[in-house]
Amino acid sequence: MMNGQTLKKLNLIIGGLIICSILLFPQFSIKDSLPKFQFIDIFLPGIIILILIQRKSFSKNRIYPFVLLFGGWIMITIIANGRTDQFRDYFELYKLLKFGCVIALFSLLNFEEVFSKILKPVFLVLVVVNMLHYFNVFNINSVIKEYYNGGIHIDMFGLNSIGEPDIKRMLGFAGNPNVNGVIFSLLSVLFLIKSRNNNTNFFLFGLACLMMFLCQSRTNLIALILVMIAYGFLTRPINRNLFKVYGVFLAAFIVSYLVSSNAYMFSLMDSNVVQSNSVMGRLEVWKHLGEMILQKPIFGHGPYKDYFYERNLFPESEFMLQTWRYGFVGIVLFISLLFSPLFSFTNSKSITRSLFVLILIVILVNSITNNPFTSREINVLFASIIGMFISAQNKNEHA
């Protein structure tokens, strides 16, 4: 039987492999008819066994009941829509299982160890990879296109819709500028949280912001601005550290402007932005999905992935997609799941609770105009961050 120290080391190793698998390693296919897998999918049975071995170490947390409730409701919608014979629908339950397991595993880890021994090194590798991609050093973009789902995004990298030179939107190993933007937004918030009186983390915070800006994600620009505002409210009394944070954030934006001009993000200030193809396309799809939601307001249409694949539709809103799939009951459960970690931090003045709000802002803003939870990278990264915050809270309570 493994002792406590061995289990702690094993937890950290598995945690590191999970982060590397979602941010650095490509997905792979076993069979054309099945979705692609990540290395974390190979680890999952072992992770479940590891969690069961350490089940007595878990503290009660309200997120786990919400995971079970949401999973139960997904199953009900599958049955209600007569889709029990649709194998692909069950992958949504599998994703939720993986989400819950990652939270559980990372709740057993030490926040500081995960931050310094896993997230920092992986982040620096990501920075190098993204810079190589941005300037296509060693023809790395051909690798991203073939192995990291770069596809059309790589074909059109630095080009507009008619093939003329245009703004580069950094994809990285995520293969998508919006997904890449969410990853760097979440990492920038983590570095921000750890930046007080730490110049190295301040530098990494600025570097993460720079990476996000080079993704040219308008949604994540708004998200980080809101994070900056919220951080200002959380910093009481106002001190020099806050102005230093704002200065680093502004400096990162200026550097990104010198590199790429930020024209795509600046289009937010264009009065005609609501008439752009991006916005008009979203509104048209949302109108269509809204009409379908009213047809099945309680149980929704179930996971039904093929509906979107067959019509080449992109819902472009997590809230809209969850409502379409699981009805109004489902969207209430989904939002409750997102907020449930806050319910677990029982002390309203808890610094852990306050700082988790910054992470939640990034997820909520992106869920309005994007689908962060259809991205396996964001799904698992967010779950690992929730687990880290639960671990930090438990440590504070027992300090």
Image (cartoon, rainbow, N blue to C red):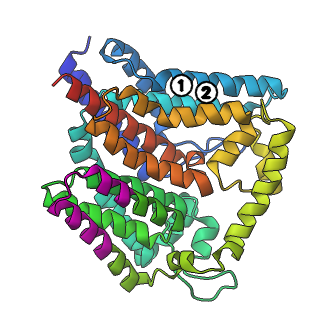
- Residue 192 rendering spot, x and y as whole percentages: 27, 55
**Vertical placement of residue 183 versus 67, above or below:** below
**Vertical placement of residue 148 versus 44, above or below:** below
Residue 60 in magenta?
A: no
Dot label at residue 66:
1
Q: Is residue 88 visible?
A: no
- Residue 117 rendering spot, x and y as whole percentages: 22, 45
Quarter containing the C terminus: top left
Locate residue 399 relative to residue 377 in the image: left or right. left
* Residue nearest the viewer, comparing 141 with 322: 322
Q: Is residue 27 visible?
A: yes
Residue at coordinates 28% horizontally, 30% vertically from top-left? 393
Residue at coordinates 41% horizontally, 63% vertically from top-left? 225
Residue type at numbered disc 2 = Phe
Dot label at residue 70:
2
**Vertical placement of residue 245 versus 293, above or below:** below
The range drawn in magenta is 227-251
* Residue nearest the viewer, comparing 124 with 29: 124
